[in-house]
């Protein structure tokens, strides 16, 4: 019996928003919108495929949106809880990936250290998808730009203001904004700015688009934005900094007054965005997160549509 050698493939990983050029991100958003409007059209598109889902940190949205998303496409996800045992502790990360690729078609991983993803991607013959690391949350950014376009009808001329911690979610949003031509103002307390390397990459990308990327600690810069985005002041793994962070971010709470100020000069309402989970009363008041201009649950829903679009593209199916 002749055994056919499997075709050599070059996997495209999704570790960072800038793993794809703007044209591909826009195609992903289009596909995600098609999926949102008619997901049944893609039923069974990834039939027979298997995924490993490795989680070193807790999750609601990412875990459920990937599991339900896989199921809608006819694929199957195996959840691996690494909450009590970090990847690399029992065996080398490299060996972990080289085992997994023998059984599954894609590895989705939420990790403490971004380099764990890079180590897997360096050896795996199957795509590795970043489900959040200390540096980036690219699946979130994809869903966020889909949501902005869904609500505002365009990304052109859109201005987003980030308020709070210059963290993983902020990083992916900045890279995506710069690449897609969305202007972004990042307001953080001093000492909590986004990482220098991300700022450098975003500024470089913005040179090819109409985007302006501005960093400041001045809250007055909130004026004149189509969307206000914030995240928890204390990300997963930063519990030991609670006192310090609560003090530093106290003035950065998104209140109705701040939303009003952001809306100055903007036709229509300014959207409130949050990746969730939120700590109500800390980074955002109930009044703002529960207002009609809040799109946080649309963002959560779109995680599944955006990720399914990404999976369909990674497998060259759509
Ligand atoms: N936004 C997000 O990634 O949520 P989870 O941490 O619940 O997955
Ligand atoms: N910045 C947050 C995002 C959670 C989705 C964290 O890393 O915990």
Image (cartoon, rainbow, N blue to C red):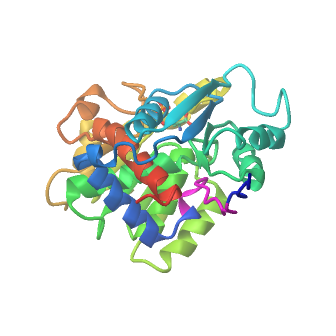
- Dominant SS type (magenta): loop
The magenta-colored residue range is 7-18
Q: Where is residue 72 in the image (x, y as percent from the top left)?
A: 37, 37
Q: In which quarter of the image is the C terminus?
A: bottom left
Residue at image location 47% in from the left, 61% down from the top: 176
Q: Position of residue 83 (x, y in %)?
A: 66, 22
Residue at image location 85% in from the left, 31% down from the top: 91
Q: Is 317 rendered above or below residue 48? A: below
Quick one: 316 or 86, which is closer to the camera?
316
Q: Is 10 rendered above or below residue 255? A: below
Q: Position of residue 263 (x, y in %)?
A: 22, 53
Residue at image location 48% in from the left, 43% down from the top: 164
Quick one: 317 or 65, which is closer to the camera?
317
Q: Toward which corner of the image does residue 27 lie, by quadrant?
A: bottom left
Q: In this view, does 265 lie to the left or right of 68?
A: left
Determine if residue 54 is in view: yes
Q: Is 167 rendered above or below residue 145? A: above
Q: Is residue 95 left or right of residue 314?
A: right
Residue at image location 51% in from the left, 27% down from the top: 59
Quick one: 71 or 189, which is closer to the camera?
71
Determine if residue 217 is in view: no
Q: Where is residue 214 in the image (x, y as percent from the top left)?
A: 47, 64
Q: Is residue 9 magenta?
A: yes
Q: Which residue is most to the top?
A: 84
Q: Does the magenta stretch include residue 199?
A: no
Q: Which residue is most to the left?
A: 268
Q: In this view, does 85 lie to the left or right of 282?
A: right
């Amino acid at each position: 019996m002749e055994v056919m050698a499997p075709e050599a493939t070059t996997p495209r990983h999704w570790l960072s928003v800038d793993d794809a050029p703007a044209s591909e991100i826009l195609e992903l958003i289009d596909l995600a919108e098609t999926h949102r409007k008619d997901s049944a059209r893609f039923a069974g598109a990834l039939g027979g495929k298997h995924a490993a889902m490795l989680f070193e940190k807790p999750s609601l949205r990412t875990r459920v949106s990937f599991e339900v998303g896989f199921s809608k496409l006819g694929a199957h996800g195996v959840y691996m809880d690494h909450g009590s045992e970090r990847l690399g502790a029992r065996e080398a990360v490299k060996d972990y990936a080289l085992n997994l690729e023998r059984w599954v078609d894609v590895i989705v991983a939420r990790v403490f250290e971004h380099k764990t993803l890079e180590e897997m991607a360096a050896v795996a013959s199957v795509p590795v998808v970043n489900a959040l690391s200390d540096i980036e949350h690219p699946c979130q950014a994809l869903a966020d730009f889909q949501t902005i376009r869904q609500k505002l009808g365009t990304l052109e001329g859109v201005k987003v203001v980030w308020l709070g911690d210059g963290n993983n979610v902020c990083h992916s949003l900045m890279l995506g904004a710069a690449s897609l031509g969305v202007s972004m103002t990042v307001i953080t307390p001093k000492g909590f700015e986004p990482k220098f390397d991300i700022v450098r990459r975003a500024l470089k990308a913005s040179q090819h688009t109409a985007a302006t990327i501005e960093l400041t600690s001045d809250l007055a810069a909130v004026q004149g934005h189509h969307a206000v985005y914030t995240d928890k002041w204390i990300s997963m793994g930063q519990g030991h900094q609670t006192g310090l962070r609560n003090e530093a971010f106290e003035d950065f709470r998104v209140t109705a007054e701040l939303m009003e100020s952001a809306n100055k000069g903007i036709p229509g309402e300014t959207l409130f965005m949050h990746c969730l989970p939120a700590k109500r009363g800390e980074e955002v008041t109930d009044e703002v997160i529960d207002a009609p201009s809040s799109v946080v649950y649309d963002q959560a829903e779109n995680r599944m549509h955006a990720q399914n679009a990404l999976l369909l593209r990674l497998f060259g199916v759509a």
